[in-house]
Amino acid sequence: MTGNFFLMFPLSGPAVIKQIISGDSVVLRLKPVNGPPAEMQLILGLIQSPKRDEPFWFEAREFLRQFVGRQVHYKIDSLLNAQKAFGDFVIQPFEGETQICRILVSRGFARVRMDPKRALTDEHFVLQQLEQSAQAQQLGLFSDAIPVHEFSQQIEDIRRFFEQHKRSPLPAIVEQVKDAGSWRVLLVQEKQYINFQLSGIKCPIYRKDIPNVEDLVEPFSEQAKFFVESRLLQKNVHVILESTTQNGFCGSVQFPAGNICEALLSEGFAKIVDWQLDIVTDKKNYLACQQKAQDKKLRLWKEYIGSGSQKSIFEAEIVKILGPDTLLIAAQKKDKVVQLASIRGPKRQKNDQGLDVGYYLDAIEFLRSRLVGERVQVKLDYIKPAEGEFEARECVTITKGTQNIGEALVGKGLANVIKHKRDDNNRSSVYDRLLQAEEKAKEQGKGIHSTEVPVHRIIDYSESAAKAKTHLSYLQRAGTLTGIVEFVASGSRLRVFVPSQNCRLTLVLGNVRVPRAPRNNDPKDKGEPFGLEASTYVSKLVLQRQIEFTVESQDRVGGFIGACAIRKSDLGLLLVEAGFAHVNDNSRNNQYKEAEKRAKDQKKNIWKDFEEALEEIVPERKLRECVVSDLSKSGLFVQFVDGDNGKKLEKMMYDFGQFHAQAGQKVMAPFAPKQGEFCSAQFTADKQWYRARVINVAGANAYQISYIDYGNSETVPGSRLRQLPPQFNTMQYPPFATSVQLQYIQLPEDDYEQDAFEYLQDLVENKTLVADLFGRQTYEAMLYVKEQTQGRIISVNEKLVANGLAYLTKDAVKKIKQDHIRQLKQGYQQKSTDLDHLYEVQQKAMKAHEKIWEYGDFTEDLQQ
């Protein structure tokens, strides 16, 4: 105590016994007024009792402990300091006696204190007679039997002690109240002192006057401490050990006067700790008690606003697994990222070969297989504050049915439990269950707790066109395969993991053409209209979900063309029905065509402005339908598919393959063809035979050849060449691949060369085209994607120019100028041509500084 002691604690008057220190020393307190009352240690000046750890100290203290909480009348004789004094007190009659000193001496719990400097009083003579009587009866201090009490202050193995005594009511005495929720307790039968905390609730911290420790006195902590002291200090209770801490135990208290946790909650001196509730022995009234304090806005709840409490538990759908402990959920018509509370998943690691090692992928698959697309219950435990580049994040407990997902993840050894600081209550509402699951996983050596480190060897079938071709025949024969969609590149292009083959591949939807989505790495690329919407639509349907698919063929960049089903529904058909896809003209799927007609009639998405075309693309010209058979930076080859050309090529290739599969053909001696000669050649990628022509003899036993039915080229040794069988000569079967030059335009050869090439790929590959051809042996063409649409068809040539990825050739610009001069001389203006329109488009691209025009008109130098 500090300040004016006499004003705080009078020299005499009524007080309450707060605590017994020994047989001759007690702590008294006054009546509380607007807060905790003043306290004082009173030493009985007329007697002397055994000190701590001396014989009969415990017995003397225990005898006096029955008076704790009772009112007495004290008198101070002299002061030792501001908080300690000599004196005496009387109690209510106890076995006919009120003088506490007489009661203690008569039972042998104290001796008369003799002070030669002070004169003896009548009370001294009375006490001496009582002492002699106790001595004669061999009571207490005067007994020949010396009691032995070996109380232990420390526990060597807290966990072992807990396992021996958990969940059993243990007789105890509350020896010290550090703060309302943290005590020092004596287990009577075990003769063991322990540090004890109340389970399931958190009280304000009171820490003061501890050497080398900073003071911490939270609001209402002193009042809460007094609330507990006045009810339980040095009272007999039963404690139930429910869990362990770093240096003690958490548990519940059984006390005849009531449940102290419920009392603290009702008075607003404590808040429920959700993550500990599961271990509390009797918690049925906790929520009601806390709600009572909240409603009255008592103490800790004085600024409480009740509207948010009902939103901490809600239902949501799992949209995507972002990591081993992070998920994207859809709740209340809004997507948001959440993290599993108190859980940290394994980090992604790769070995020297670039292969995934560890349990990162396993943890993601565990969550994906159980959650994606499912409705779950989400409980908000706490909000992790923003830190550095990381945004604030809601940390939640997710339950599917009766299964706690976080607990199951930890139990499989696929995540660790975060070790929170003691005073950090921002943790999972089932934190103790998580710790138990982790401990069990460690004991069983599961997952990250095992000595084995898995290596995930996943083959990429679509790494290149050549590699894809080696796997194509197997995938075609395999029929229906099951896969998991890992990534949606566009509405018709999916990245799929196939568990049965331990491979990844790119799946391209056949029969349909979906608008191109924007490229992620190009902020200026907005894609085609409805491209982004189509990609989003497909992502919601299939991303991270299990699909079934079949493979029919492959494209030129390693993608496998086929069909995909999600929950027995054809994905391509769903896209067409939603108005996000055109049906290819060569498709024979009537169901697709009917769905497309319905989408057109309802003007869905890409068809919102659709009107039936009144005329052909360019009715006055003779056009050819074709598909791109080879596209490289050195040229473009097409195969004409109008009429019966497609069937002819298919039949010829089948017969050609059968011929070369004959045993005799396999062992035929190779030959040395001359430049320009036709031959059979074995393609490097798939080891199949195709018709070819020698372009150049590149050296000793090295031939540069071109495959005449596809257009691609490579250099091969003579051992992979054979004479062309006469039944497959070019008179009988003219080459099916035709070289085509995009009319009037030229692709750049500078920094935008790759961008132009990739954009051209997107425009023409895997699509049926219409070519307006010019020339006889060497063709120039205006290319159009064949599809039914409104108004003027935009050519591939124009799209390249409009996006700043191609420019008019020198000859084309010269022709425009000559035509303009002629028109001026003749005094008339002829109908606008394709070339005129391309020139206008190029001018707009130049003004907008698109791509190659970024730094102005570079063609001025070319025209010199």
Image (cartoon, helix red, strand yellow):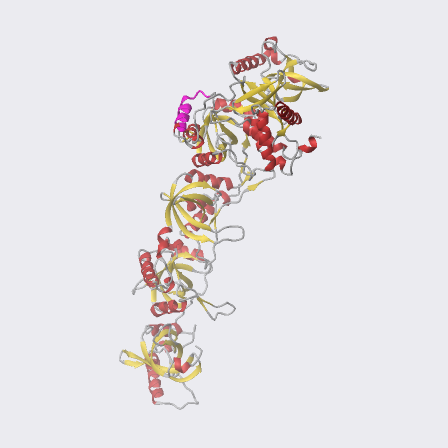
Residue 808 shows in this picture: yes
* Left or right: where 189 falls relative to 516: left
Q: Which image quadrant for residue 852?
A: top right
Task: Assign the N terminus to one quadrant of the image.
Answer: bottom left
Give the residue at x 44% y 82%: 80
Whether residue 594 appears in magenta in the rendering, the answer is: yes
Residue 515, x across and y down, in percent: 49, 31
The image position of residue 256, as x and y in percent, is 29, 64
| Residue 177 visible in the picture | no
Q: Is residue 304 magenta?
A: no
Magenta range is 587-600
* Relative to 308, residue 822 above or below: above
Is residue 198 or residue 822 the one in the foreground? 822
Task: Depth check: give the residue in front, 763 or 466.
Answer: 763
**x and y percentages locating residue 282 in the rendered image:** 32, 56
Q: Residue furthest left?
A: 96
Q: Quadrant of the C terminus?
A: top right
